[in-house]
Amino acid sequence: MPLNRREFVSRSAATAAGAALAGGLPVVAAAPAAAAQGADARKAPQKQGFTVMGTTDLHGRVLNWDYFTDAEYDDKAHNDVGLAKISTLVKQVREEKGCHRTLLIDSGDTIQGTQLAYYYARIEPITAKRPPRHPMAAAMNAIGYDAAALGNHEFNYGIPLLRAYEEQLDFPLLGANALYAKNERPAFEPYVIKEMHLGHGRPLRVGILGLTNPGIAIWDKANVSGKMVFPGIVEAAKKYVPRMRAAGADVVVVSSHSGADGATSYGDQLPWGENVSAQLAEEVPGVDAVLVGHAHKEIPQRLVVNKQTGRNVVLSEPLCWGQRLTCFDFEVEFSHGSWQVTSVSSRVLNSNTVPEDPAIVKLIAGQHKKVVAYVNQVIGTCKTELSIAEAPFKDVPIIDLIGRVQADTVKAALASTEYANLPVLAQAAPFNRTAVIPAGDVRLRDAAGLYIYENTLEARILTGAQIKDYLEFSARYFAQLAPGAPVDLGTLTNAGSTPDYNYDSVYGVSYDIDVAQPVGSRIVGLSFNGAPIDPAAQFVLAVNNYRAGGGGNFPHVAAAKQVWSNSDEIRNTMIAWVKAKGVIDPADFGAVSWRLVRAGVPLF
């Protein structure tokens, strides 16, 4: 049985609950019982409307605040972020539609992504003996969410913290394809059915199915291996949608932590796709709408025709971090004793059009103040400003700093082992294009803004030939550029939709990337200590756990021998390194060890 300890069954829905519980899952009443049905109800209009609202990829954002800059969040489009803004939008929709005609769901990735979320996972964790309320749980409970799907980042801090977070929620955390490894039984509630009393006919039953990303098995291998498995999204939907219909669901909404479609970040290492929400809509009959997550894209509305039924399925993905709120607007008709969907459409509301809900702001004001103090502590000084802005196409000192910290850490860890004499290299990627380490005082938030993920550090052994293969794979990040063609920085990088976090440079070797050449033939002059690299020589690669686990599908590294690993975040390792050094001096680590060329001519 799933580990959820709560019974999500309303006292006023006992009869409907009994039918659903026969299938092992609860029915929840979303509103008080309607007036008695009878001749008057039959005479009234039978078409009714309701709205399912949705968020996704909130990533620890409650307030419209950037903890890395210690200022109100802003971007070029002047978007706003956070649950406090979402709360205002939700209140407006509930007022417009009527509370009893609305539901609110989320599609995952809630407890990782800001220093606010990090603080209550690592500094003052919610797993303590006297745990604080997680700010995301507090805000989502106060807003009145009805259900949420698991995201892959929910597992970043380990299963015990995820369970502690789940216990703090007043709504179910759903994951139909998150199973116990020992018996492949559900580790979380697969779905929930909510009752809505629309005033005509029997209560409308809305089923919400939660699905998470199979990539968790790779990305958080250290946290889930041997404990949980994550089979395919489409396969799980094919299993559970019929069960939901049999349990009485008139409407089925899928909360899918999976992009609509497009490139994946782990290739073919697993038999299941990463971004398959559109495929789900095409292949699984009985689905009315899909709340899409994971991809951090904005899809106001996308219609997908189900191959079996020929009916349209509506997909929508609100922009991440609480920048948008999706609204699925349903029209249903009660006829011949049952409810039928007659139409459904979707739209997104922009959170920058409304003020923050003061109730949510007040709710976490104390926690916010505590985290602001934490991120503003001074950890050292820097001799000159270091910016990451040009890192996607130039070797800049701020990326070399990441490499140096990782290489130093691994060298120290291996000093008394049989691998002490092997040269240590290090991979690094430009995670955050706005990161800056200022001249003068360096605060904790400066380091956190440079390394925004909760990755940990490992050491793997690769040969010189494998390092070259690794770099060739990484160089697919650049578009091919013919000699003489104009250089457009807007199209030079991210070729094939490769994200910045999947472009690695390697600290400790020197090389050119010839973008005039096709993918696979771009690394030129690869050398170590001034001499051409020996293909048979062994190197230790300091690498983050995401990459070591196969994230990005880089060659060789996932199968390479592991000689060391650490459970602390690389971000914390960087903070400790800066504290120990006292002063960051780019002269100690910065060097132009790689460059972009075109037919041998430097591009910059």
Image (cartoon, rainbow, N blue to C red):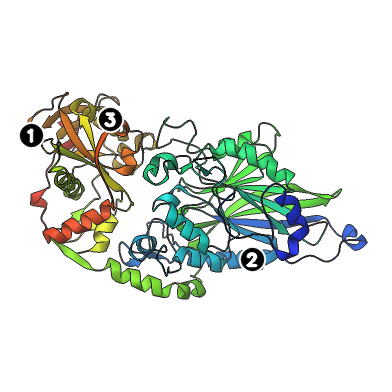
Q: Residues within 10 Å of mark 3 (few under 14, many from 20)?
A: some
- Give the mark, 3 or 2, whose residue is nearer the N terminus: 2
**Rendered image: mark on residue 135:** none
| Quadrant in the picture for the C terminus | top left
In this rendering, position of residue 559 left or right of residue 233: left
- Which residue sits at x=62%, y=33%? 283
Distance from the alpha carbon under mark 3 to that under mark 2 = 52 Å
Q: Is residue 309 left or right of residue 437?
A: right
Residue nearest the viewer, comparing 237 with 199: 237
Nearer the observer, 243 or 525: 243
302, 163: nearer the viewer: 163
Q: Nearer the viewer, mark 3 or mark 2?
A: 2
| Amino acid at pointer 2 | Arg
Q: Are marks 1 and 2 in contact (CB under 8 Å)?
A: no
Q: Amino acid at mark 3?
A: Leu
Tag 1 residue: 529
Kindly identify which residue carries mark 2: 94
| Secondary structure of residue under mark 3 | loop
Residue 120, relative to residue 156: is it above or below?
A: below
Residue at 90%, 61% (x, y): give it. 38
Q: Nearer the viewer, residue 453 or 260?
A: 453
Q: Is residue 395 above or below residue 26?
A: above
Helix, strand or loop under label 2: helix
| Residue 88, x across and y down, in percent | 54, 68
The residue where tag 3 is placed is: 481
Give the residue drawn at x 83%, y 56%. 201
Q: Position of residue 251 (x, y in %)?
A: 70, 48
Q: Are marks 3 and 2 in contact (CB under 8 Å)?
A: no
As drawn, 478 above or below 68:
above
Residue at the (72%, 58%) spot, across then down: 195
Tell me residue 258's x, y (percent). Answer: 50, 43
- Tag 1 secondary structure: loop
